[in-house]
Amino acid sequence: MRLFIAVLLSKNLVDPLIRSMHDLKTQGVDGNFVPAKNLHITLAFLGEVEQPAAVKDVMKAVPFQPFRVALTDPVTMGGHLAIGVKGNQKFKSYVNALRAELDKNNIAYDKQKFNPHVTILRKPSYKKPYKLVIPKEEMTVEKISLMKSEEKNGKPVYTEIFSVKA
C-alpha cells in the first residue's frame, strides 16, 4: 500500500488555491492541475508499506498540538508548480518529532530535506510568462492524516485511512 502522512487543507485554503489555478488556466498555463480534493501538505512520504499499523502506532506516539500554517511564495519543484508553506515552531517541531519516531521504528520514508509546500500543477506548460497570485491565507492544523495513494483511471486518488487529532 502506497502511503504518506499529510495535512489536509481547510476550505479557506483550498478555495483560494482553486481560484489561483483557474487564473493560471485563463493565462494559458496548461498541465496536470491537482484536483481540489487532493491538495495537501506532505509531512512524510512513505511509499510502499506492508504494515500500516506500525505507521499508525508512530502517529499515535508523537505528541500533537494544533499549529498554524500559511501559504507563501510559488516554488518550482522537479517539474511541479507548488505554493510554499510556512509554519510556526510547533509545526517544525512536530515534523521533526514525527520523522525521528519513524526513524526510531525503522519505517522508511523519503528523507529529502523537509520543504513544506502544496503542489498545484504537475508538468506545467506555458508559451508566455504568467503571474501567479498567492492568496494570503492561513489555517490551524488540528489533524494529521495517513493517506493511501492509488491510481484509478490514470489519476491519483488519495484516501485518508487514519488520523490523529489534537
Image (tube, rainbow, N blue to C red):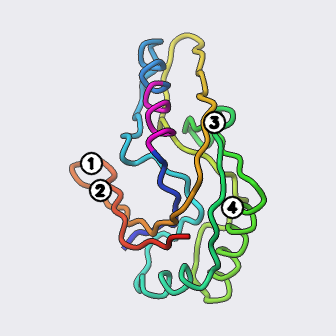
Q: Position of residue 42 (x, y in %)?
A: 55, 57
First in sequence: mark 1 vs mark 3: 3
Checking the image for residue 151, the label placed there is 2
Q: Secondary structure at mark 2?
A: strand
Q: Amino acid at mark 2?
A: Glu
Look at label 1 and name its amino acid.
Answer: Gly
Residue at left offset 71%, top offset 75%: 97
Residue position for label 3 = 76
Number of on-image labels: 4
Q: Which residue is label 4 attached to?
A: 112
Which amino acid does the dot numbered 4 rest on?
Gln
Secondary structure at badge 3 equals strand
Give the alpha-carbon distance from disc 1 to disc 3, as whole Å: 24 Å
Our reading of the magenta stretch's main secondary structure is: helix
From the viewer's perspective, is residue 100 above or below residue 156? below
Residue 57 drawn at (x, y percent): 51, 87
Q: Between marks 2 and 1, how big is the CA–CA gap?
A: 6 Å
Calculate the distance from the C-alpha at mark 2 to the C-alpha at mark 3: 24 Å
